[in-house]
Image (spheres, helix red, strand yellow):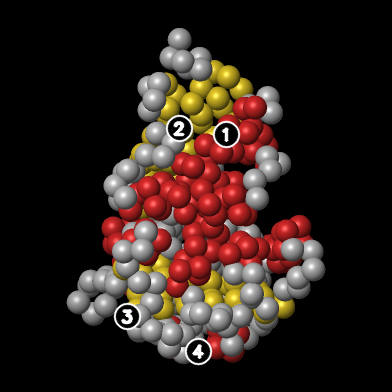
């Protein structure tokens, strides 16, 4: 009945490559598409203090490949308070019926989110895509360009828009860590950079840039919104083809993308695309919009891999919580 408590520091330097994370996340989508995993819709509750714009949410899921049950919780006090964002995940081993780990979830989210972006690009970008633009330099955005390059090594132009010097520096450092011979072009004109890029990823909050519109894309362009407020409310409706990681999640976290009738409708879900049951796009010239919202079936395998390696390295505390 021992629970492993793993802090942000315990997990910070545990090595796991972009390719490993991408494989774990893609396997998570496949297991879900094949009915082996379960992932109820995210439960989200806004806090009734308008001046804070605080939010809390939780996710529950089961990974059929690992036979692990996961519970994830997140709380953020205000959209401009990055230092007051707390997220945890707890894992239970369904083969033994015992708890395994309670972990800080920042590293997990910063890994599985760009992995989902990369997988989306792998299946939905037009054939022959050679350029990508990342908008945003927060925790979940700093790994995005190296992850994209891992699945699409043919990308020649890598662009970045950001407003925070530390985030820009960390994004460049992360690229140099995995791809030391590649350079990132910093851009200031967002509409022009969008029009010049085959793949556009928006992970900005209330950022200092015009909200990105699908119509800015070149024919065949792919716009991936990481649940971002930096995307125009009409981006989904203006797309030739629209996908989401989960239609249910879109209905919770993407309501501002709803059309005049209040509906948010898509053409396909990412797990079905990965499983080969749905198309990533209908035609090369389609402007595709993809809405990425976190699914715990992708958190669980990444969390389990990091926890297993951390425990093997002697990290964390062992707590007999139920003794």
Q: Is residue 183 visible?
A: yes
Contact between marks 1 and 2 (CB within 8 A): the answer is: yes
Contact between marks 3 and 2 (CB within 8 A): the answer is: no
Residue at 37% across, 39% down: 64
Question: Image check: 5 left or right of 170?
Answer: left
Q: Say which of 84 and 269 sits in front.
A: 269
Q: Please, is residue 63 above or below residue 133 in the view?
A: above
What residue is pinned by disc 2? 91
Q: Please, is residue 32 above or below residue 171 in the view?
A: above
Question: Image check: 104 left or right of 95?
Answer: right
Q: Please, is residue 72 above or below residue 281 in the view?
A: above
User: Counting residues from the N terminus, which is met first, the one under dot 1 or under dot 3?
Assistant: 3
Residue at 79% across, 64% down: 180
Nearer the observer, disc 3 or disc 2?
A: 2
What residue is pinned by disc 1? 307
Answer few, some or many: residues within 10 Å of disc 4's Cα (few below 14, many 20 plus, some between 14 and 19): some
What residue is pinned by disc 4? 218
Question: Image check: 57 left or right of 259?
Answer: right
User: Counting residues from the N terminus, which is met first, the one under dot 1 or under dot 2?
Assistant: 2
**Outermost residue toward the front?**
276
């Amino acid at each position: 009945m021992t629970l492993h408590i793993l802090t942000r520091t315990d997990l910070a330097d545990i090595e796991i490559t972009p390719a490993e994370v991408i494989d774990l996340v893609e396997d998570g989508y496949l297991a879900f598409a094949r009915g082996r995993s379960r992932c109820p819709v995210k439960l989200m509750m806004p806090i009734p203090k308008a001046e804070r714009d605080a939010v809390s949410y939780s996710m529950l899921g089961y990974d059929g490949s690992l036979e692990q049950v996961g519970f994830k919780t997140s709380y953020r006090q205000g959209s401009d308070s990055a230092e007051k964002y707390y997220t945890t995940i707890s894992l239970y081993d369904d083969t033994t019926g015992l708890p395994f780990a309670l972990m800080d979830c920042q590293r997990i989210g910063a890994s599985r989110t760009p992995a989902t972006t990369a997988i989306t690009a792998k299946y939905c970008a037009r054939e022959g895509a050679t350029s990508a633009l990342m908008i945003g330099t927060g925790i979940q955005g700093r790994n995005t360009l190296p992850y994209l390059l891992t699945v699409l090594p043919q990308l020649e132009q890598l662009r970045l828009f950001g407003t925070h010097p530390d985030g820009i520096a960390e994004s460049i450092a992360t690229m140099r860590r995995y791809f030391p011979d590649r350079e990132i072009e910093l851009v200031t004109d967002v509409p022009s950079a969008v029009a010049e890029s085959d793949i556009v990823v928006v992970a900005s909050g209330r950022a200092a840039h015009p909200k990105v519109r699908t119509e800015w894309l070149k024919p065949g362009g792919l716009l991936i919104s990481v649940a971002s407020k930096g995307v125009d409310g009409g981006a989904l409706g203006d797309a030739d083809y629209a996908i989401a990681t989960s239609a249910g999640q879109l209905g919770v976290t993407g309501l501002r993308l709803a059309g005049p009738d209040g509906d948010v409708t898509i053409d396909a879900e990412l797990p079905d695309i990965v499983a080969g049951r749905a198309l990533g796009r209908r035609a090369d010239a389609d402007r595709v919009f993809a809405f990425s919202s976190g699914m715990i079936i992708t958190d669980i395998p990444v969390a389990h891999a990091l926890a297993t390696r951390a425990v093997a390295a002697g990290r964390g505390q062992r707590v007999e919580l139920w003794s």
